Image (cartoon, rainbow, N blue to C red):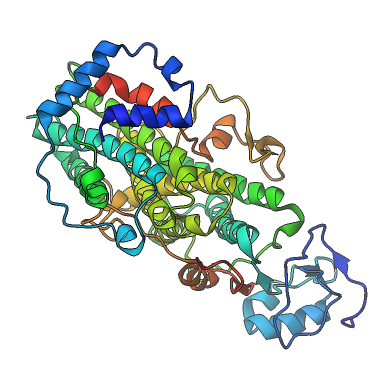
Amino acid sequence: MKAGKQLHLTNFDMSKQQQSSGLPTLPGGIEPVMVGRRLFLRYAGAFAAGGALIASCKNAEENPITVPVSVDLGTGDIGILNYAYALEQLEAAFYTQVVATPYANMSAAELAILTDIRNHEIIHREFFKAALGTMAIGALVPEFGTVNFTDRTSVLSTAKAFEDLGVSAYNGAGNLITSPDYLLLAGKIVSVEARHAAAIRDLLNPKSADFAGDDVVAPATGLDVASKPTAVLPIAQTFVKTPITGANLPTA
Amino acid sequence: MNLFNIISEIEKIDPEANEKFNFYSRRNLMKIGSNLVAAGIPVFVATTLNQAFAQSAGPSAAAVGVLNYALTLEYLEDEYYRLGLAASGLIPTTDRTIMTQISKHEAAHVALLKGALGTSAVAKPAFKFPTGTFTSYQTFLGLARALEDTGVAAYKGQAGALINDKPILQTALQIHSVEARHASEVRRLLALKGWVSDPAQTTFSQGGVNLKTLPNVTGFSDDSFREAFDEPLTMAQVLTIATPYLG
């Protein structure tokens, strides 16, 4: 397939996405694209050193897959909402996998908690996608290779990391938002993430101080962590194949 | 500044606040006033000053009002857990670590807000709690849950008012998520879910988006849609909730 050939498109509007440098030129601004095997392999080589992606592509012609082209979150409030959307995509994908393939000896109570959280994260993801409309970034391709989904500690530790990261990200992004309406929406979501974080932390270390542990809530001030996108995105990136840039996000 | 000022602040924001508070008799207001005088301003060394204030020319008048409102709620929470921890036999040994951690944070929030407000800080009011609060652990947890969930909603409700005081907004958000962690933990001690579903909420729209018609949410319960977004409370709503506990 030549780069310029008409491609199968998803029904996403990918106007906010960009390609990273050094890759074949695709028709302007239209990604992620569903492509045939040959172009896919070129991308796979460029992005992922092959392995897992190629192994999963046995029937590329029949089941074209989404190529992880790079994503630019954009500018201003829309950029911050896309930043939130990216994090929610990551969380939703993670919990979807957790519930689909429960770790060994997952109790009914734990399954109920993790299913609730999955539902909340999917609702958040779909909410941002709908609210952003044509300004929404595309679907990110998660990379959970470091997570052992059969192991309780691996899953819950990853969940804890995601929830704490989400809390710190929303806390740090609040004063980058200019619209009071968006600020309130972010506020409505961040406390739900904090509730998740406390529950997950209590599952890992029941009846301890960890639900709001000194590692995240500074003992002297009682303040939770607040992190800027420049600190959050490199961490999030380790769980996402799709290269994400927040270079155009507001910084103050 | 005292509670009179907070109520007048509310009236600036919500001209109908006085109507809404018509149950709140003048007599009670006077009582609060005299208690405030009697209590005086506690001697309190705020060891941690809010960097927000060091970096800015100072908070706006609106921010001072919000911070004193927050401080009043933190005074209430701080006193509540202090009394709970001091009540012999109330908190089971297994849960003391949790309650001590929460109490530590509430004390830190009081110190932080007082330090930030300096001479503008409202004095600590006298509080009262229902009979039996500190003799039944389930009763104690029940009110703790109410205070924490209300605290989360109260901070959230003020975010917009701080949008032009960015460092203060960030600090308020950093307290807000801690209250949410507390709320989740206390709720789960009560065998509740860590997240909130208010059955009275029968519409499912956020930011103009109907959550129930989104893709990929087929089969989700109404609870999931309610739980996914924590709702705010206005200052007037919060004071209605807090009033029974003001001495």
- The quadrant where residue B55 appears: bottom left
Res. B80 image quadrant: top left
**In percent of the image, x 30 and y 35: which residue is there?**
B189
Q: Is residue B188 visible?
A: yes
Please identify the residue farthest to the bottom as the structure is shown: A22
Instruction: Residue A109 in the image: state x and y as whole percent.
Output: 42, 39
Q: Position of residue A87 (x, y in %)?
A: 55, 59
- On screen, residue B102 versus residue B218, left or right, reads left
> Residue B204: x, y in percent?
63, 32
Inspect this view and state whether residue A106 appears. Answer: no
Across and down, in percent, residue B43 comes to 9, 43
Residue lying furthest right: A6
Q: Above or below — where is A47 with respect to B225? A: below
Q: Quadrant of residue A76?
A: bottom right
The foreground one among B169 and A13 is B169
Who is closer to the viewer here, B159 or B214? B159
Quarter of the rendering occupied by the N terminus of chain A:
bottom right
Residue at image x 49%, y 30%? B197
Q: Residue at x 17, y 52 (%)?
A: B46
- In the image, residue B32 sits, relative to residue A168, either above or below, namely above
Q: Specify whether A10 is left or right of B114.
A: right
In this rendering, position of residue A65 left or right of residue B97: right
Number of dots carrying numbers? 0
B168 over A161 or under it: above or below: above
- Residue nearer the viewer, B236 or B129: B236
